[in-house]
Image (spheres, helix red, strand yellow):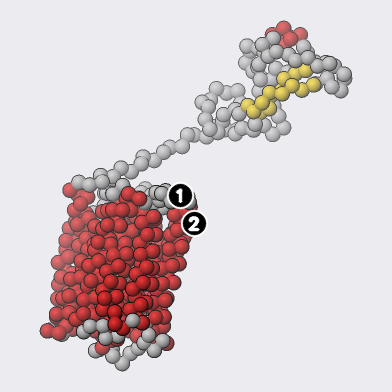
Amino acid sequence: MSSTISPGSSQHAETSPHLRDDIGLFSKKEPIPYQGENERVSTSRTPVTATNRLDIEKDTLVDENASSGGSTTAIRRTVTPVAASVTQPEVLQPKAEYPEGGLRAWLVVCGSFSGMFACFGLMNTVGVLQAYVSAHQLAEYDSSSIGWIFSIYIFLSFFCGVQIGPIFDAKGPRWLVFWGSICLVAGTFGLANSTAGGVGTSLIFTPAVSSIAHFFSIKRGTATGLAATGGSVGGVVFPLILQRLLISIGWTWAIRIMAFIDLFLVCIANLLIRSRLPPRPGGSVWPDFRIFRQLNFAVTTAGVYFMEWGLFIPLTYISSWALDNGVGNQAFAFELLAILNAASFFGRWIPGYAADVIGRFNTMIITMFLCLFSLLVFFIPATVVPDCRIVLAVLFSIFFGFASGSNISLTPVCVGQLCDVEEYGRYYATCYTVVSVGCLTGVPIAGEILTRDGGNYRGLIAFTVACYAAGTVCFAFVRVRRGGWGFFAKA
């Protein structure tokens, strides 16, 4: 018969020869280390940490004389294996603090505004340029061939960022913006904007966006949205200037006047764009595509890819569509692009503010749905209902301009949620290096669709709808992974 021994009974501890005292439960003496086949308990008096804590799971009563028929029982304690050595506590890096405002921070936003005015103002004018050269200098070429000129420009504007982002993280923005300004202005003066202008845009654009992240975290969406409105203002000013100057003084001097405007703007950008945080120790200037192992980042990049694949198609072909379908005169066709860019001014700032309140990915998904809505409800009917084309064209320009404006302003803050600020330039540039392939192929693919459809724009619009639908699915996937299925979850 077995009898239970109280742990507090010292008498039984002294008189029972079979009772083990391996863990010093009944004695005031120093406990004897327990030696097991695959486990060891150290008796050294080291501080208890997550790696050397002795985890005692349970006490059990076992019969040690079962084979001999004895009745003495013993208490055996189950011990989980522990590390043989004590690891040093992890040294936590100090968390970056952000001014979230102040004179210096808002001057950086102002400098980024000027830089994006010069870069994206010109990029948002490609619709006017494409419509003009298609009717004059390149009238004998088809839409697909002409589309390559502007797609190369857009491609280089984003592709070069794969190297520029890591250099920004390691060296800062000053020399990047300086050489970008030279390339942009020289390319525009020399009518080589597709190559030199594209490289210059990339050199200015990446530091302009990344520098804001050094000063803002909670208000990053608002600050980035305000800076991105520079591209919208340029997209309004430049088409209206070209509309007047192309008729009065011709192509060459109209482009050169735009280059003088860009020269003034990039001077402001060089004076004001600065970084704040020191480079991360040991930071490399080389890109690292291993970051695509992070599923959220990889799917976000895919979403941006599909979004940009479709974004520049309406921007490029809205004026040509109006001219080909007799929607107003040439002045009205150019003004449609100005209306679209004017609406995108509010679409870059208001969604940026909303993103800080309800979540960056939530806001991106809402604006993507608005892009789909404008394409399906306004643009497609405008191609098949001749009597309402002017009204539908204006409504499409307003709705799509507002919704697509966030495509530029929200992408940086969405990517910024997936990395540390010291690596922001690398992540953002790597993302847009992949996205640049979509920018390179989107406009020529749309041009080829237009050519095969005999000048009918319905296939082109359907391709744009498919791009935005795929991008919406990607952003929704990341949003669910970060915030769950809750409708009001901030993500």
Which amino acid type is marked by label 1?
Answer: Gly
Rendered position, 168 above or below 20: below
Q: Determine the residue positioned at 41% across, 68% down.
A: 468
At mark 1, the secondary structure is loop
Q: Earlier in the sequence, mark 1 or mark 2?
A: 2
Between circles 1 and 2, the one closer to the viewer is: 1
Question: At 31% across and 83% down in the image, what residue appears?
Answer: 386
- Give the residue at x 60% y 34%: 83
Question: Closest to the observer: 15 or 440?
Answer: 440
Q: Are marks 1 and 2 in contact (CB under 8 Å)?
A: no
Q: Is residue 203 visible?
A: no
Q: Around disc 2, counting alpha carbons within 10 Å, would you say few (fewer than 14), some (14 to 19), or many (20 or more)?
A: few
Note whether 484 is above or below 68 in the view shown.
below
Q: Which residue is mark 1?
A: 486
Q: Quadrant of residue 267?
A: bottom left
In the rendered image, which quarter is residue 342 located in?
bottom left
Q: Position of residue 444 (x, y in %)?
A: 38, 80
Q: Residue at x 37, y 68 (%)?
A: 373
**What numbered label is drawn on residue 178?**
none
For the N terminus, give its image quadrant. top right
On screen, residue 139 versus residue 426, left or right, reads left
Amino acid type at circle 2 is Leu
Q: Helix or strand or loop: what does disc 2 sit on?
A: helix
The spot of residue 312 in percent (x, y) is 33, 73
Q: Position of residue 477 (x, y in %)?
A: 47, 58
* In the displayed structure image, the side of residue 307 where residue 58 appears, left or right: right
Mark-to-mark CA distance, 1 and 2: 21 Å
Quarter of the rendering containing residue 317: bottom left
Judging by the rendered image, the residue that carries numbered circle 2 is 295
Figure check: 87 above or below 246: above
